[in-house]
Amino acid sequence: MKNLPAGIATTLTVPFQNASGVAVTPTGIIVTVLDEDGRILHGPEIPTASLEDEELVYVVPAAANVLAPGEAVGVRTLEVELTTADGAFDLRHSYMIRAALRLRHLVNSFATYERLLVVAEDLPRLDAWVMAEQSQREPALIEAYNRLTRFGYRVYPAGYDDGDEVNFNAISGPIEHVAPREWQAMTPDDFERFNPQFRKALARAQVQEANAILTVGTAEDHRASGLLSKTTGESSAMFRSGKPLDLGVSRETLEHLSGFIEIRARISRS
């Protein structure tokens, strides 16, 4: 499926052929543009095309390629109904549209894509990230942001930094707590007030978790399923009776958030 920028007109070429690829001569053409939910965005209309041609060259208007607020990706389908001497049938051509800027600061990311590229340069063993294209990284980064904003955090006052880490033993100032629901109303000014090391930790965790999302069949996946050992020769495997605690992010991601992440469990009587 083609990937095209959102918000601009798109030209599509549709050959006049039946399902078997045999050329047909239409006696009538009706065109409709649909979104990913099958809603009509444009048409139905009779295009200004010659029935003598071998194909239809149709321009989907820019208005039909506009994404709704908050959406980063959509699908558009050009539905062409051809009427011929042998009957009528539909031709459908779909394409994907993407917002020019997918990552939005504190909407679906802790930083811009370019800033996260810089962050990734300092992180080792990002094999899946390195091999991925931007079109693959961005959805993974957005999913990583969604996972990380489900946690609460302890934010320590600035000024207690010891190199690249916070010297937690030296902290005497007030500690701010960020609940998961607060991320929805977080503004860039609010975020900039936080300890720089906290902001850096979140960016590193977002990249690390994106790498985990892009990675399939890792050793951690096996551990999460309860695998204790695996023998290659005469293949055998041993699983524990229970699975390790699953917090929804990888172990490597949690390491970046050490000292900041706040996990609370409520115990109630039944």
Image: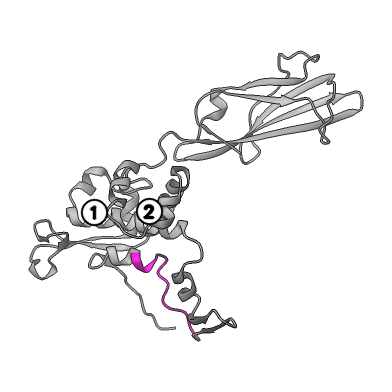
- Describe the element under mark 2 as helix, strand or loop: helix
Is residue 16 part of the magenta span, yes or no?
no
User: Looking at the image, which residue is at 89% across and 28% down?
Assistant: 87
The x and y percentages for residue 57 are 68, 20
Q: Say which amino acid is labelled 2.
A: Tyr
Q: Which tag is nearer the camera, tag 1 or tag 2?
A: 1
Q: Quadrant of residue 128?
A: bottom left
Check the image and report above or below for 247 versus 4. Answer: below
User: According to the image, label 1 marks what residue?
Assistant: 200
Residue wearing tag 2 = 145
In terms of secondary structure, where does tag 1 sit? helix
Q: Where's the C terminus, which quadrant? A: bottom left
Q: Residue at x 38, y 59 (%)?
A: 209
The magenta-colored residue range is 242-252
Give how far across and how far down residue 258 sits, in percent: 25, 67
| Front in this rendered view, residue 227 or 166 | 227
The answer to whether residue 97 is above or below residue 154 is above
Q: Amino acid at mark 1?
A: Lys
